[in-house]
Amino acid sequence: MMNGWVDVCIHSSLDTGELLSRLDDATVQGAWEDGGEVHLYWAETQWTEERLSALHVALTDLASSSQEPSLSVTRVPAQDWNEAWARSVKPLRIGRFIIRPSWEPVTLAPRDLEIILDPKQAFGTGHHATTRMLLEWLQEDIRGGERILDVGTGSAILAMAAIKLGAASAVGVEIDAVAVDCAREYVELNHLADTIDIVTGTLADLAQSRTTPDLVLANLDRQTVLGLAEGLVSLARCGARIHVSGILSEQRDEIVERFSDLGLVCSKQQEAEGWVALAFLRLESCEGEA
């Protein structure tokens, strides 16, 4: 008889990618966000009190206040697993994009663009405000032919969206090996392997010979963005636009000040559900012209 599953529902709009990174548990079998909740899944045979304790520690570390988010643990019988997934994860529209799991067919309008994502450990299904804001910006900013760099690509949803909108090529760089495997599967599933390259590593690991991108996407977190600021600014000085997300509203001024000190100007910003997205441009060109 097949064993069942454990569904841990965290009642908070956390960044799923950061939570999985802090948890660092390869036995997590799935993760998705919806309606101010995060769901994590384990096989019942792998769920232990030690894993619950580790989850509490990770949530305490991530809590923006002194109060840890509440959670509930539900056991899902094996025979109900596929039904539970299908019931939980539905197609999502963000502008022209329809983001759907492979088991949910949809009828597309003439201008609709489809991205197929089956929720796994690699976060980035479009449900979180940080991802959604950048997807909305891409629909405004992609004109065709752009070279995209997606730093911390996760599921590669942003890179795939850019290509669907007409960008010429995209490189997604990701330090998490599990996310890299998932991203490559998604790219293949969406028939975009010819135009998207998923690279394991950090921004500093990218080969110097790579062509300078026109647009850099960085849906990360405050600490990582601050740590990468100089590398991102060096790309902007050579002409790239920088779109940053994963920043809490109260962290906005710190991020803007950091990039301003390095010579960039915040050209636009958007806020949703307590998160902000920020767009940065160089103040001067490489030749020193305004």
Image (cartoon, rainbow, N blue to C red):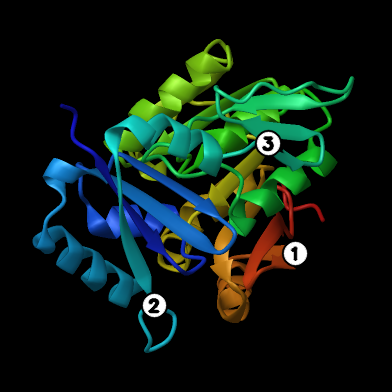
Q: Which of 106 and 68 lies nearest the eye of the viewer?
A: 106
- The first of marks 1 and 3 along the sequence is 3
Marker disc for residue 63: 2
Secondary structure at numbered mark 2:
loop
Instruction: Say which of marks 2 and 1 sits in front.
Output: 2
| Relative to 183, 3 lies left or right | left
Residue 19 at x, y = what percent?
Answer: 35, 59
> Foreground residue, 248 or 63?
63
Residue that appears at 54% across and 39% down: 87
Please name the residue that numbered disc 1 is placed on: 270
Residue type marked 3: Asp
| Amino acid identity at mark 1 | Gln
Task: Tell me the SS state at disc 1.
Answer: strand
Depth check: give the residue in front, 131 or 50: 50
Whether residues under marks 1 and 3 lie with C-beta atoms below 8 angstroms apart, the answer is no
Residue found 62% across the figure and 79% down from its top = 253
Instruction: Tell which tag, 2 or 3, sits nearer the viewer.
Output: 2
